[in-house]
Amino acid sequence: MNGRPNIVLVHGAWADGSCWSGVIERLQAGGYHVTAPQFPLTSTPDDVARLRQVLKLQDGPTIVAGHSYGGQIMTALGTDAPNVAGLVYVAAFGLDQGESLSALLSQGPTPPALAHLFTDEQGFIWQPQDDFVQHFAADVDPVHANAMHAVQQPIAESAFAAPMGVPAWRSLPSSYLIATQDQAIPPDAQRMFASRMGATTIEVPASHVAMVSHPDETAQLIRTAAEARVAMPAGQAAR
């Protein structure tokens, strides 16, 4: 250990750990130990179990950063996250107790990036290529965006219906990157998430995949969260 918290990065739906590559490179250059595992996206409990598996491998306090549905995964850690020192939401869902993704998404018009999702025979949801490139990753070079689409992982439809328990952000310090050009999670919804969790907040003129198009700002927010917890023992994070 070099005195810095570990960093665990949680990808969302229609993505994999490689979406964090630019952020990983910047954090590693700063001396941070970074892990960006693959999540099965088979159910929220399965994904939380994977996150707990990875957290047990960390030697000391850990900052967890999640993108999109990755926010759902880390929020669902609840009050049982003994070595987590802080949470960083990157254009991510930050549900409160009793809320579900499906109920939340039904409250307004369907965002352009989610307008043509389709479900296969096994109950997994996929995103069409055109919507991915034009809306989901709108500010990413199309060649890179098409490669991102090629490695997308579908998400189980059931994950959207799962109600949230006590959210982890109620007991852990949180930061939030609001993507102001997001066509998947409306920026105003992101502002609502950030406000009610009392998060340290920045706004970036980015599409939904802000960690890809704006890795500098994303990495800096994670570094700031980590630096704020350097002297704080694991399990004793406080707002």
Image: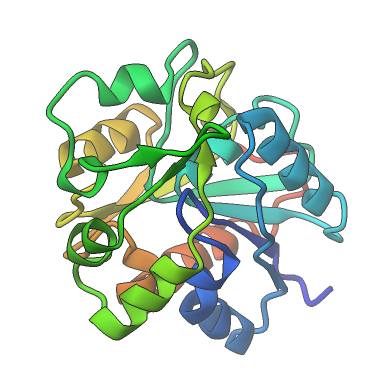
In the figure, residue 44 lies in which quadrant? top right
Residue closest to the eye, 46 or 35: 46
Left or right of residue 152, residue 230 in this image: right
Using the image, determine if residue 105 lies above or below residue 202.
Answer: above
User: Horizontal and vertical percent for residue 11?
Assistant: 53, 56
| 164 to the left or right of 45 | left
Look at 19% across and 58% down and name the residue there.
135
Q: Is residue 239 visible?
A: no
Residue 122 at x, y percent in the picture: 58, 34
In this view, the residue farthest toward the front is 121
Is residue 148 positioned above or below 172 on the image? Answer: below
Residue at position x 65%, y 26% in the image: 78
Q: Is residue 79 above or below residue 180?
A: above
The residue sitting at 35% across, 40% down in the picture is 118
Q: Quadrant of the N terminus?
A: bottom right
Q: Nearer the viewer, residue 99 or 138?
A: 138
Q: What colour scheme has been applied to the protein in the rendered image?
A: rainbow
Residue 107 image point, x, y percent: 20, 18
Q: Is residue 11 above or below residue 17?
A: above
Q: Position of residue 74 (x, y in %)?
A: 59, 40
Total numbered labels:
0
Q: Going by the picture, which residue comes out furthest to the bottom?
A: 29
In the image, taking residue 117 as reference, residue 238 lies left or right, namely right
Q: Tell me if I can see residue 54 in this picture.
A: yes
Q: Outermost residue, top direction?
A: 98
Residue at x 53%, y 78% (from the top left corner): 21
